Image (cartoon, rainbow, N blue to C red):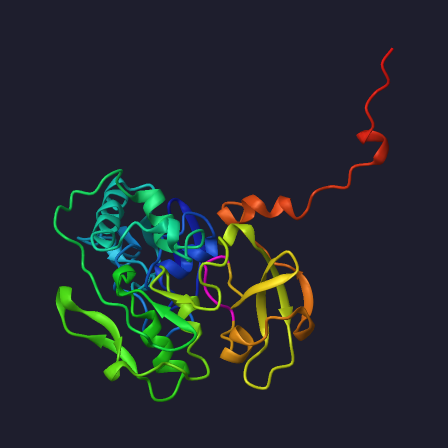
Amino acid sequence: MKVTIDDISIDVPPGTTILEAARMIGENVPPTMCYYSKLEGSGGKCRSCLVKVTKGSEKDPRPMPKLVASCRTNVMDGMEVKNTTSPEVLQARKSVTEFLLINHPIDCPVCDQAGECDLQDLSYEHGLSKSRYDFKKRIFDLIDIGENIQMHMTRCIMCYRCVMVADQLTPERVHGVLNRGEASEISTYIQKAIDNEFSGNMIDVCPVGALTDKTFRFKSRVWFTKPVYAHRDCKTCSGKVTLWYQGAEVLRVTGRKNKWHEVEEFICNDCRFHKKNTEDWVIESAATISRHSVISQNLNVYEKPVIHKKLQEKPKSE
């Protein structure tokens, strides 16, 4: 099937969504806050990936009457889509961003997710300079959900990714969505601890700072760390991870993420929380970081070129 997105055409197999086609092109990709390719059933909740279909297909060239969620809309042969070239789409994303920020606190200076937060990126691209919301934001009491994961419901945007991780990766899920409407929240059943073997992946899939790593909490800003790919022989998971170094110390361990900020392979809690010595791992290479990421801006601190001794000597005065 042939689809054209922002005047760039590509052939894709049947069943491909507009978002997947845009990722294949690699340019002008719609932003996502709830869609996660590794999680079945994700997408269609945050509405940040809206696009305009100006031509439905070759058989039916009529445009779609409303903007559609690119993560949930399949490509038709001959379809034409406008993403960043449509003022209507850009205005819709500004509105969606404003809604997402209605209850989300701007506490980036103390949030461990700062520097790798999808909502931060979305707000930078499409956010308003000031909020029009005059009412009090939602406030939730802190709930202890275990020794490894810290939950801040005030930051949650209800993307449901963490619930899907628990449904699809772990047995006997003990947390989910409680209540309805504005009162909806992620919580555990009678405040049970979340301690199953793959629960740490909730941290990796969370697009904001609602779920953070207690073992990394307040230790460093992410742009002061150096990410390195490593692996180990693990009987529970693939053992392929990213180690985040500060000097010679491993501050945290995460799954390896691709350029769409999605984990390539989910890892177990033993690798994530209990293996923080270099001796536990086989180091492969420096992690690939986009030059647009704030994390990349400080990597030159660790990669200073060696200056020849003669160049350091002051020139002799005449």
Across and down, in percent, residue 31 comes to 36, 53
Location of residue 118 by image quarter:
bottom left
Instruction: Identify which residue, 163 or 194, lies in the foreground.
Output: 194
Residue furthest out toward the bottom: 172
What residue lies at 23% left-to-right and 75% top-to-bottom?
Answer: 177
- In the image, residue 148 lies in the stretch drawn in magenta: no
Across and down, in percent, residue 117 comes to 40, 55
Residue furthest out toward the top: 318
Q: Kindly tell me whether residue 175 is visible in this rendering.
A: yes
Principal secondary structure, stretch drawn in magenta: loop
What residue lies at 83% left-to-right and 20% top-to-bottom?
Answer: 315
What residue lies at 49% left-to-right and 47% top-to-bottom?
Answer: 294
Across and down, in percent, residue 179 comes to 15, 74
Instruction: Identify which residue, 51 or 211, lies in the foreground.
Output: 211
Instruction: Identify which residue, 288 or 2, lies in the foreground.
Output: 288
Task: Say which quadrant the N terminus sits in.
Answer: bottom left
Across and down, in percent, residue 134 comes to 13, 46
**Which region of the structure is painted magenta?**
259-264
Q: Is residue 49 above or below residue 309?
A: below
Q: Is residue 58 above or below residue 86?
A: below
Horizontal side, residue 101 vs residue 195: left or right: left
Location of residue 192 by image quarter:
bottom left
